[in-house]
Image: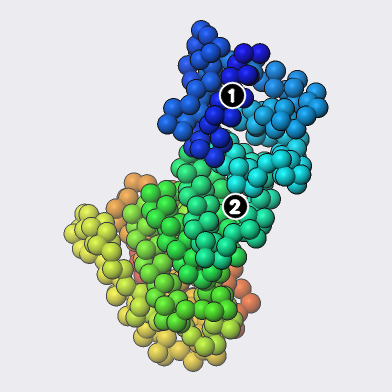
Amino acid sequence: MEAYALFVQTIASHPISTLTDFGFTPPVDSADESVIVVEGNLGIAANHIEPLWRHAHALYFGATNTLDKENSSILLLLFNPELYSAWNVRKTLLKTGAVSLSNELALVSLVLSKHPKRPAAWAHRAWLLPQLVSTTLPEHIDAFYAGELEVCRKAALRHRMNYHAWTYRWKVVRNASLQFKLFAFQEAKAYISSHISEHSAFAHALAILESIKNEKNQPQPDTVKALFYSELNETMCLIARYPGHKSPWCYLQGLFLITNEPESCETDSLSLDDLRFEDSWFDRVLASREDGRLFSDVDVLDWLKVWIAESTWEETMLSRRLLAFSTWIIAASRVVSASHTEEAPIMWKNQIEAALDFQLYLLQGRTGSEDLRLHVKGLIEREGTCPAFLLMTP
């Protein structure tokens, strides 16, 4: 078949490692134009997809030599990455030395350029990862990891909510150095800043943050603490800016869980003095209130600090954390109410209720939890504008 012969010839003259993208081009009249390469982009004419697939499929299952098996499997996987038998054949070719690790990695990248969310392709890349890491020199490992992060970023941009890309990214980052984890965390946050609904991205960032916190060779404690407070501030600002999105609320809960471990309660506690919303977005949003009154987080925080000063709790550390979390939720709900009057009930129900349910879960079984529940309930009641379900009744 002329089109298949042209494909094999094209792959021979343009190795997979030199190709960056794959896609389909408009129909052509001649088979001589069915496969093209332009500036590293491989294209196959749309009207030749079916005949090429049929020919490659027949050749793949009837091939008796390694070269035919290799070329036909490449074409089949470019068309359909969920052909698991083809990936298994590629594994065999790797083990026998017929293809190299670097070329195989390039093939997966080329497949993902067209099919960024196919789990079989990501599974094959994950299978390659330990072998690639073991053959990479220590001084080059961070550069290799950075390249893998870039592949994940492109895949996430090409297909939103790309759970498989973020899962693979975590497989890359979890065994990296602390310095690289910090780099990967900032890269993930840069992506989140323009993709506010990406639950997988938020969960991934949270996993990296927890890994940094639990790192044996931790940076200075003040560095980790500063990173947490920075995340707290940024998350509250995201909630103020995009109140109709659930991802920041879930991330806020995750931040609280990470810092609320029993051992950390014994040695450190969140300072209410540090809960300040520095981003000017808060002022801009609140300035849109009809009555013109700006809400300051100091109002609520001062009241909470007075209550804490008079408290005789045995679990002082835990109470501080729960009250701080209450403050986050109350402040955010007021922001939502101030700038989204008509939609506020729906947004409250969909976004804030989950956060408060989470807080109720934390309160269950704690010493003095009923006193804390009643106090926070009274605090919310005094707000006067909050819907009933925010009152956290048993």
Q: Position of residue 248 (x, y in %)?
A: 45, 57
The amino acid type of the residue labelled 1 equals Gln
* Pick the front one: 29 or 253: 29
Residue at left offset 63%, top offset 55%: 132
Tell me if residue 176 can be seen.
no
Q: Position of residue 162 (x, y in %)?
A: 54, 45
Residue 298's quadrant in the figure?
Answer: bottom left
Q: Nearer the viewer, mark 1 or mark 2?
A: 1
User: How many numbered marks does the figure carry?
Assistant: 2
Residue 124 is marked as: none
Q: Position of residue 330 (x, y in %)?
A: 39, 66
> Is disc 2 surrounded by few (<14), some (14 to 19) or many (20+) residues within 10 Å?
some
For numbered disc 2, what is the local secondary structure? helix
Q: Is residue 208 above or below residue 338?
A: below
Residue 295's quadrant in the figure?
Answer: bottom left
* Pick the front one: 255 or 142: 142
Distance between mark 1 and mark 2 Cα atoms: 33 Å
Tell me if residue 13 can be seen.
yes
The amino acid type of the residue labelled 2 equals Tyr
Residue denoted by label 2? 168
Q: Position of residue 371 (x, y in %)?
A: 52, 80
Residue denoted by label 1? 9
